[in-house]
Amino acid sequence: MRPHERVKAAIEQSEGPAVVGFLTAGHPHPDRFLRDLAAIAEAADAVEIGVPFSDPMADGVTVQRSSRVAIEHGVSLRWIFAELERRDFELAAPVLLMSYLNPLLAFGYERLAARAAETGVCGFIVPDLPFEESGPLKAALDAAGLALVQLVTPATPRERLRRLAAESSGFLYAVTRTGTTGAGLSVPAELAEYLAAVKAASPLPVCAGFGVRERAHVELIGRHVDGVIVGSALVEVLESGADPAAFLRGLKGRSATV
């Protein structure tokens, strides 16, 4: 099974909605990175490793804070690959890197694909990469069997949504900005319509980034898409020193405590 197929299979084979966990590499401390990664991979269906970046466009305050801490500790893309290479355990879930484009450009696409494949990375998510300029990176990743996950938003026109869905690999990332989960535990009608359109257009599983913090949110969003992406809440769990695997098992309904 090629790396991008591992990502797709992991989400499709989840019992209930898949949970994709996010951590920023080297946060809250570089010494904990491999231990935290192993714990998250054991409990989640897939893992996003955030490459810290000084000028993010799409991250909220929590992820921005985690990136600043990691950068202050000297974490870089080169450091992440070195850490992944020195690990002495198998990852229980496929791992993707989520990075802004500049570090990837600086690394070089062919070298990037080779290092990713060598170190067990299955794909990339690049929030600031325009689809029209994604060809060179996609070609390099395709050659190594790696995923390039495309992102769509509620503002994405339907025809463009179909193109992005057709070109994505691993899964399709549905960014949700027009509504929140919470007190009423309901998805606004316009957001439900958007998620339904994304799901209908995609030959791949669809995972939604939504501000998930508890099991009820996973169940609610899982009625519309195949999985959820847990970012800021998991970063805060790591900051607090709590067990990230216990938190994720709670989201998946495998523990009474979240």
Image: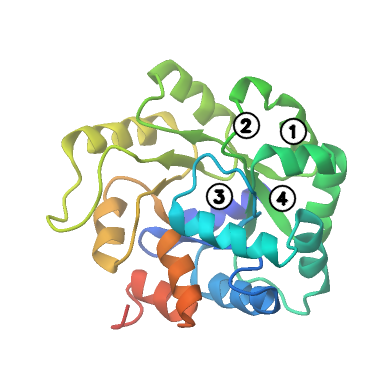
Judging by the rendered image, the residue that carries numbered circle 2 is 129
For marks 4 and 3 on the same chain, the one whose residue lies earlier in the sequence: 4
* Image quarter of residue 42: bottom right
Disc 3 vs disc 1: Cβ atoms closer than 8 Å? no
Residue pointed to by mark 3: 8
Circle 3 sits in a helix, a strand or a loop, which is it? Answer: helix
Contact flag, marks 2 and 4 (Cβ < 8 Å): no
Mark 4–mark 3 distance (CA, rounded to whole Å): 10 Å
N-term mark: 2 or 4? 4
In this figure, which colouring scheme has been used for the structure? rainbow
Q: Mark 4 points at which residue?
A: 2
Per the image, label 1 sits on a secondary structure element best described as: helix
Residue 166 visible, this angle: yes
Which tag is nearer the camera, tag 3 or tag 1? 1
* Pointer 1 with pointer 4, Cβ within 8 A: no
The residue closer to the viewer here, 79 or 45, is 79
Pointer 3 or 2: first along the chain: 3
Q: Which amino acid does label 4 sit on?
A: Arg
> Real-space Cα distance between discs 3 and 2?
21 Å
Q: Which residue is drawn at 34% across and 82% down?
A: 255
> Earlier along the polypeptide chain: callout 1 or callout 2?
2
Q: Is residue 7 above or below residue 154?
A: below
Q: How far apart are marks 2 and 4 (CA)?
A: 23 Å
User: Does residue 129 appear to the left or right of 109 in the view shown?
Assistant: left
Looking at the image, tell me whether mark 1 or mark 4 is earlier in sequence order.
4
Residue 47, horizontal then vertical, whole percent:
57, 61
Q: Nearer the viewer, residue 156 or 162?
A: 156
Percent position of residue 179, x then y: 25, 42
Q: How far apart are marks 3 and 1 (CA)?
A: 20 Å
| Viewer-side label of 3, 2 | 2
Of residue 155 and residue 172, the one placed in the foreground of this image is 155
